[in-house]
């Protein structure tokens, strides 16, 4: 017992020391990064072509005129993101569960899951958007939607479900087999053990990587612009063509940063909290 307490105390001390060392390193790294950015900024603003770049990409008048329209169009990106995310969470989990089935009778489901993940992780998202966005409506089959927005959401959902399924599967594999064995020993069948014991632990482990995938999904919503859907990127293209200026693209980039940066920081906080919890360090 004393050895266990001593080991736990040493882990806590090591963690605190690592955090303090990491804090000092972060401060030094931040100062160095700021110094480098200032130097790079100084070199850019002193270059011979800076005035042209400033007029074409950082024109405040064009930015202020185009930003409201781009912000309104960005709501379409948010709708695409939320719709695709809801589908991906459910379908990705279903694919991971299919692949976890062990009985020989479920071999077709396992094979489907493996083939699906291999195919849709191998096809670039923009190609799938082209294929579905232009190909599916061209079939002119009764009952099949022709909306490019619909097929854009479907394409993103199919692509990212393959990635999220692998994240779920990694979380399920990370749960020790003894957890399921203990649940079965208590009288639960395999389905109950998976639902009540394995899945809650697996999902808790994979929340940070899931958030990272959703950051990528949010950025990929701009790809639907190739179908003509007026979202942030498409609106920026229209404004740029009207003004012969590239500043609207900067305005669109700002809109994406307003979403992705908070999500990134939240993901980092989740990872840090999970690490402290595993080491038994108080928050």
Image (spheres, helix red, strand yellow):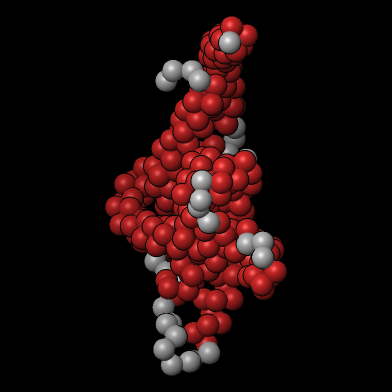
Q: Residue 104 sits in which quadrant?
A: bottom right
Q: Classify residue 234 by image quadrant.
A: bottom left
Question: In this orientation, does residue 26 appear?
Answer: yes
Split into 4 quadrants, where in the image is the C terminus? top left
Residue drawn at (49%, 84%) of the image: 137
Residue 219: % across, % down: 49, 52
On screen, residue 73 above or below 33: below
| 263 lies above or below 18 | below
At a point 49% along the width and 18% down the height, the residue shown is: 281
Using residue 215 as the reference point, say whether residue 122 is left or right of it. right
Residue at the spot x=43%, y=82% of the render? 146
Residue 31 horizontal side relative to residue 255, left or right:
right
For the point 40% across and 44% down, the residue is 259
**Picture coordinates of residue 129, whole percent (x, y):** 55, 70
Q: Is residue 11 above or below residue 226?
A: above
Horizontal and vertical percent for residue 126? 59, 65
Which corner quadrant holds the N terminus?
top right
Say which of 152 and 89 sits in front.
89
Q: Give percent across and percent down for residue 68.
A: 29, 52
Pick whichever, 129 or 249, lies toward us.
129
Q: How many marks?
A: 0
Is residue 209 in view from this perspective? no
User: In this picture, is 248 found above or below 80?
Assistant: above
């Amino acid at each position: 017992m004393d050895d266990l307490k001593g080991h736990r105390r040493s882990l806590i001390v090591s963690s605190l020391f690592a955090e303090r060392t990491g804090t000092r390193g972060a401060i030094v790294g931040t100062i160095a990064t700021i110094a480098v950015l200032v130097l790079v900024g100084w070199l850019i603003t002193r270059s011979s072509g800076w005035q042209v770049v400033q007029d074409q990409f950082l024109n405040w008048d064009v930015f202020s005129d185009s930003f409201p329209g781009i912000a309104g169009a960005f709501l379409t990106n948010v709708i695409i993101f939320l719709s695709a995310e809801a589908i991906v969470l459910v379908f990705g989990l279903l694919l991971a569960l299919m692949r976890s089935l062990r009985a020989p009778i479920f071999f077709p489901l396992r094979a489907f899951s493996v083939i699906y993940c291999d195919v849709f992780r191998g096809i670039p998202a923009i190609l799938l958007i082209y294929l579905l966005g232009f190909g599916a409506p061209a079939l002119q089959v009764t009952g099949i939607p022709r909306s490019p927005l619909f097929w854009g959401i479907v394409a993103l959902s199919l692509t990212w479900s393959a990635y999220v399924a692998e994240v779920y599967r990694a979380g399920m594999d990370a749960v020790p087999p003894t957890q399921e064995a203990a649940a079965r020993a208590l009288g639960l069948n395999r389905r109950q053990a998976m639902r009540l014991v394995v899945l809650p632990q697996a999902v808790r482990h994979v929340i940070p990587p899931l958030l990272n995938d959703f950051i990528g999904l949010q950025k990929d919503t701009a790809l639907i612009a190739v179908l003509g859907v007026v979202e942030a990127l498409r609106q920026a293209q229209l404004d740029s063509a009207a003004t012969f200026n590239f500043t609207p693209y900067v305005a669109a980039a700002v809109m994406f940063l307003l979403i992705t940066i908070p999500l990134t920081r939240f993901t980092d906080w989740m990872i840090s909290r999970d690490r402290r919890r595993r080491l038994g360090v108080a928050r």
